[in-house]
Image (cartoon, rainbow, N blue to C red):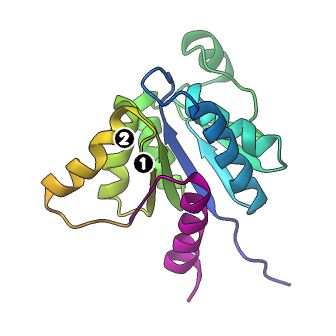
Amino acid sequence: METRPPQIKIAISGAAVTTPCREDVHQIAYDIGKKLAQNGCVVLTGATTGVPLWVAKGAFENNGFVIGISPARSYKEHTKLYKLPTDYHHVILYSGEGYSGRNLLLIKMGDGVLFICGRIGTLNEFTAAFEEEKPMAVLLNSGGTESYFQDIIEKAKRGPGKIIWEENSDLLVEKFINQIKTDIYID
């Protein structure tokens, strides 16, 4: 049996409501999803709106594979109670864990976590990913809680972590994929 290289799984963390984000965040998120798809990555999202949905759309529309991890227990709860979309995902897994439990599952399932803009949930995912020693990539100047991430790392005095800080989204994705290949997949 021939062994093929594993597909890199990138968890996306970002603002579900994009008002605190930079104006062009939807296009940037779409382009990041497209670039991840072009590099054969599986995109994992919190099956939500905003930044994660735009990344999912970019990946989905460019032949990428997208998996959502829902906070809900079922499709009905996902769409009716949480009022979350199902668009641009090939598979949605219903965790039944609520938002904070879903956040932890999402970052644990990814080979790395990519952060774009953010609000409180993104901040939760950022600190959890750091504690889990996950490879992380942060799109600088994307808005919201992202602007606090470097201060948090500095004030925590726990070392730099495995974080790529980059303002150029194309370079961010390229550096991140290479970091994951090196850290996780290449002996």
Magenta stretch, residue numbers: 163-187
**x then y, percent, for residue 10:** 59, 55
**x then y, percent, for residue 1:** 86, 84
Q: 65 or 166, which lies in front?
A: 166
* Residue 140, disc: 1
**Residue 88 placement, left or right of 32:** right
| Residue type of the residue flagged with mark 1 | Leu
Q: Compared with residue 36, is residue 21 higher up or lower down, i.e. above or below? A: above
Secondary structure beneath dot 2 equals helix
Can you tell which quarter of the image residue 53 is in?
top right
Q: Residue at x 54, y 54 (%)?
A: 168
Q: 170 or 71, which lies in front?
A: 170
Q: Compared with residue 117, is residue 78 higher up or lower down, i.e. above or below? A: above
Q: Compared with residue 66, is residue 134 higher up or lower down, i.e. above or below? A: below
Q: Residue at x 46, y 32 (%)?
A: 97
Q: Residue at x 59, y 36 (%)?
A: 52
- Judged by depth in the image, the label closer to the viewer, 2 or 1, is 1
**Does the magenta segment cover residue 182?**
yes
**x then y, percent, for residue 139:** 47, 49
Q: Are marks 2 and 1 in contact (CB under 8 Å)?
A: yes
**Does the magenta segment cover residue 150?**
no
| Residue type of the residue flagged with mark 2 | Glu
* Residue 2, disc: none
**Residue 6 placement, left or right of 16:** right
**Cα distance, mark 2 to mark 1?**
7 Å
Of pointers 2 and 1, the one earlier in the residue sequence: 1
Q: 78 or 128, which lies in front?
A: 128
Magenta-colored segment: predominant secondary structure: helix
Q: What residue is disc 2 on?
A: 146
**Residue 152 placement, left or right of 178:** left
User: Is residue 172 in sight in this rendering?
Assistant: yes
